[in-house]
Image (cartoon, rainbow, N blue to C red):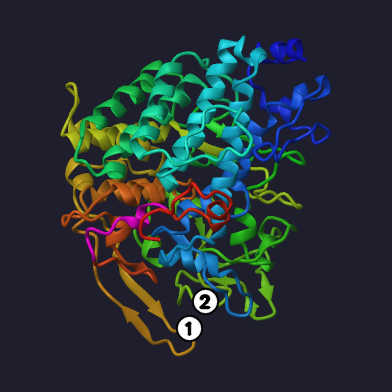
Amino acid sequence: MKKIIFSLCLLPLAFTSCTDLDETIYDTIAAEKYEFTAEDAASMFSPVYSNLRNMYWGWNGLNDISEECSDLWCTPFRIGVGWGDLYITLHQHTYVNTLDHVWTEWYYGYNGITACNQLLDDEGVQSSPTAVAQLRGYRALYYYLLFDLFRNIPLDTTYDHPDGWQPSQAKPQETWDFIISELNDIKGKCGADNGMGQINDATVNMILAKMYLNHEAWFRDGDKSFYGKAIDVVNEIIDSKQYALSANYLDNFKEDISGSPEIIFGIPFEYLYASGNCYANKWMNEAGRATWGFNGWATGGSACLPQFLATYDKDDMRLNETWIWGQQYALNGDPIITDDGPLVYTTTLSSINGCYPMEGARLVKYEIIGSDWGTSYDDVPFFRYADALMIKAECLLRLGGYKGETEQDAANLVTQVRQRNFANPAKATRTVAQLKGGSCYKYGYQETDPNTGEKFETTEGGADIILGGLLDDLAWEFIGEHHRRQDLVRFTMTNGQNVYNGKSWFCKKALTDVNDHHLDIFPIGIDFLDGNPNLVQNPGY
């Protein structure tokens, strides 16, 4: 068995060899030990990949938990249709330890870590430096995501434990130090181009860049030196000239994105073997499926927040490439008619607690394919080259320049990302003043009684957001890509409070205590607390 494992490890950790449903998939690998046979060897790497797919696009996965709580979109209770209270909880930031999303992230995150630990403890795997480096990179990716979401997490680096062992939480600084040390130790050891779903050298640099970019927001220590470190690692990606912006924005959101020059790290999804992206199902009205000849299940639940939709420049091609509203048409061009009349999506929303089925613009950024496919097999553009450029721009602005590059260089980078989206080059150009100025988002509480039409509104605006113009650009570029919660936590207002807590939008109210940061992270799920007496709930929950 060791020889078989060793021969597998001499090859890249190929995703394609681990997706056959005839192979044994060990979904319970975190819960029990298993004595592998020679026949099992080809499946041993499968949990490393499958748990990330489940963590990201399992029901109530990473994308949902990162965006449903943001100022971009929501899933309201649909009058006559329904939907779960958990989406209302996410939107209003009334998090509880029974929230399904926190279970999904913790469970699959630690399943993935355990799968990595098990392989790293194997003598055959240890004989392959490349396999070891890539597994450590995957483990660091899992820890980065869990650290961002929960902060106070167990740090486990081995598979073999005494009977009855239960993990305890590490201090955040200890976990931070471990992730940074791991990533720096494997830099340049994973390979330049390993294919979709596999850790390469640029992916290691992107995880490092995210760690450095968010350090000040996570620790609130005022240490800006990490912004320079973030620039250094993304410069390695830029200087390699291995990646480039795709000619068309939507090239990054097709079913198969492996051909896009922009994808640094993508999570592959495959027909039959690995489905998951449920955007078409969550966003499309049942009758609206006719636009694509899509016949899979559809609920028409999610919708764009009107306040965000109003921020787009009408000449920004991403507006119509990302959203649809108005009268909907079938493939043959006929208007779609429902039992309630023409299918017309509005650009308004009444309340998170009650919206009619046709309210709200719908997301169409990810490729929707006919038959029963929808978006189910669309790959995930986890790290894009545009992200690397925007990280550098943000850090240059936060530092006021770095190693001879200036704030104008930051504006040039943002302009570079925008250029493919505007026919008029002048519209694509962003100035330093615009990026450092306030947000054009009209923040404030906005709710309408769907039955009486009575409005409840407050006006907060976005003028007091530091680097508010850049925050707007991040939303237009990365909507629907698991970025927004992290961005809102990182960006602050002139009173020192972050936007995530300090602003109201739609039916979410701002926190009045500028020193209350407990919502920056989520509660630990009740199932994990009950199952491990060593775990302590996060502060404030």
- For mark 2, give the secondary structure: loop
Residue drawn where x is 47% and y is 39% of the image: 154
Query: Mark 2–mark 1 contact, CB under 8 Å?
Result: yes
- Give the dominant element type of the magenta stretch: helix, strand or loop: loop
Residue 470, magenta (yes or no): no
Q: Is residue 446 above or below residue 399?
A: below
Rendered-image quadrant of the N terminus? top right
Check the image and name the residue furthest to the front.
163
Residue 519, magenta (yes or no): yes
The residue under label 1 is which amino acid type?
A: Pro
Q: Quadrant of residue 514?
A: bottom left
Q: Nearer the viewer, residue 318 or 196?
A: 196
Q: Is residue 315 above or below residue 454?
A: above
x, y (%) of residue 296?
73, 57
Q: Which label was assigned to residue 154? A: none
The residue under label 2 is which amino acid type?
A: Cys
- For mark 1, give the secondary structure: loop
Q: Quadrant of residue 458?
A: bottom left
x, y (%) of residue 25?
75, 35
For label 2, count other residues whose C-alpha is less than 10 Å away and answer few (under 14), some (14-19) or many (20+). many
Q: Is residue 255 left or right of residue 399?
A: right
Q: Nearer the viewer, residue 141 or 525?
A: 525
Task: Look at mark 2 in the image and give the residue it sits on.
Answer: 355
The magenta stretch is 513-521
Residue drawn where x is 58% and y is 20% of the image: 194
Task: Look at mark 1 in the image and give the residue it sits on.
Answer: 450
Instruction: State how many labels appear.
Output: 2
